[in-house]
Image: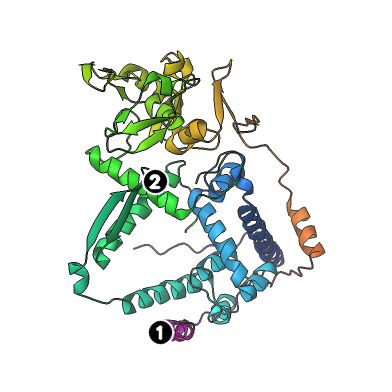
Amino acid sequence: MASATPICATLPEDEIRQLEDQITELAAHIHAANFRLLTLIRRFDESGGWAGPGLRSCAHWLNWKCGIGMNAAREKVRAAHALVELPKISASFSKGEISYSKVRAMTRVATAENEEFLLRIALHGTAAHVERAVRQFKRTRRNEALEAENDRHERRQVVWRLDDDGSFLFYGRFTPEQGERIMKAIDMAMDEIDEEQQDVTAETPAEPKSGQPIHSPVDQRRADALERLADGFLSGRAGGVNGGDRCTVHVHTDLDTLRADGEGAESTLEQGGNVSAETSRRLSCDCGVVPWKESDDGKTLDIGRKTRTIPPSIRRALQKRDQGCRFPGCTAHKYVDAHHIKHWADGGETKLDNLVTLCRHHHRLIHEGGFGVKMGTTGQPIFRDPQGKSIPQAPTTRFRGNVFGLMTQNRRAGVDVSAETCIADWCGEKMDNDLVVGKLIELDSQSQ
């Protein structure tokens, strides 16, 4: 077997050392700037500044405006909030002494009790050392937490009832295995709702009311995820379920309720619940319609044939044209509906220049959230927020700064950076994993 050819430096030794110093010094400046970036992200998220244009979360805003992959964006938001409770790690990060990779790993397990110990590992070791310590600590705690309680199996149950307002209330009790499987399925469905909106090129890892930037609470996202799981099961196949292909939900309504200027307030579901007129308009945008004629006393006189509001040929052409949700900043391509820009109940035609593809989230914003859409003269849909302001298809281009500006800003902020600032104190010795994990477990038990 031929031996590997050694790589020889092509520059003089002193020039190599200068390049090395420039790289490590600039890296430390970038670390300090990353701390400021996370601080700004946290403040932006807490203020709800991302919610204006109808986006789902701060991570989606980062994906749209900053070009950050969804997994990486969610990690940045998580780490940004975690740093608030970790002043020692924050201080070291702000001075450029530790990298974002180390911070990201530490914030997964850091507490007030173990923060200082984790920081010592980060300052003396590499990012790989920190990742390994965190990973093994989490695995050990998980193994210690395993318990078996046989009566859980006998106490498993699911019950539901219809509330006074027509909402369904579910209560469940599951064994640990069942609960883990169910929560994993819900978490995966939640992740899919987010990740389907873009192709993830990441690093490792409720809807706002009209005019109000409010976060979508996690319990609402879980409800949406559970509905998606039901859709997937009832459709009898894996993968995306588009409008017109999903399982049947019967909505009993009339044209007076479906028209924009109609007087009907609500429609009735098959199980007795009610939905608003605007929700009825959204559901009927892309559905099967069965004409049903009744007498004044409620007796059925005639039932017509079921037809689809979007014929298959037009749906194929629409899918080929739009290739997913057309709302600015959204890249969802599964679980999408065809939206009638002018509703068919108001005389709108079912043709391509009156149709646009929307994901469930943005379809609801258009109908119930006060947002609007019309087809422009160039064939591009134009979206407007509840205040009537046009939403740009692409983020506004801004000046992104430069290396020298970054260094100047750090110095003005009092960040003293040199070529040695971010270099770990590791000298090649092997880390004692058992010692590290044992100490982390000891510190963790002090907080319980």
Disc 2 to disc 1: CB gap under 8 Å: no
Where's the C terminus, which quadrant? bottom left
Instruction: Between label 2 and label 1, give the one nearer the viewer.
Output: 2
Q: Which mark is residue 434?
A: 1
Q: Tell me the quarter of the image containing the N terminus.
A: bottom left
Disc 1 crowd rating (10 Å Cα; few below 14, some 14-19, many 20+) is few
Q: Secondary structure at mark 1?
A: helix
Q: Horizontal and vertical percent for residue 115?
A: 56, 78
Direction from residue 297 to residue 446 in the image, left or right: right
Residue drawn at x 33%, y 58% as measured from the top left? 183
Q: Is residue 200 above or below residue 111?
A: above
Does the image show residue 360? yes
Give the extent of the magenta segment. Answer: 423-448
Identified by mark 1, the residue type is: Asp
Whether residue 377 is situated above or below residue 419 in the rendered picture = above
What secondary structure is found at the residue carrying circle 2?
helix
Q: Residues within 10 Å of mark 2 (few under 14, many from 20)?
A: some
Can you give x and y, in whole percent of width and height, for residue 105 in the image?
51, 68
Read off the residue under disc 2: 224
**Is 337 situated above or below 3?**
above
Looking at the picture, does residue 213 appear above or below residue 178? above
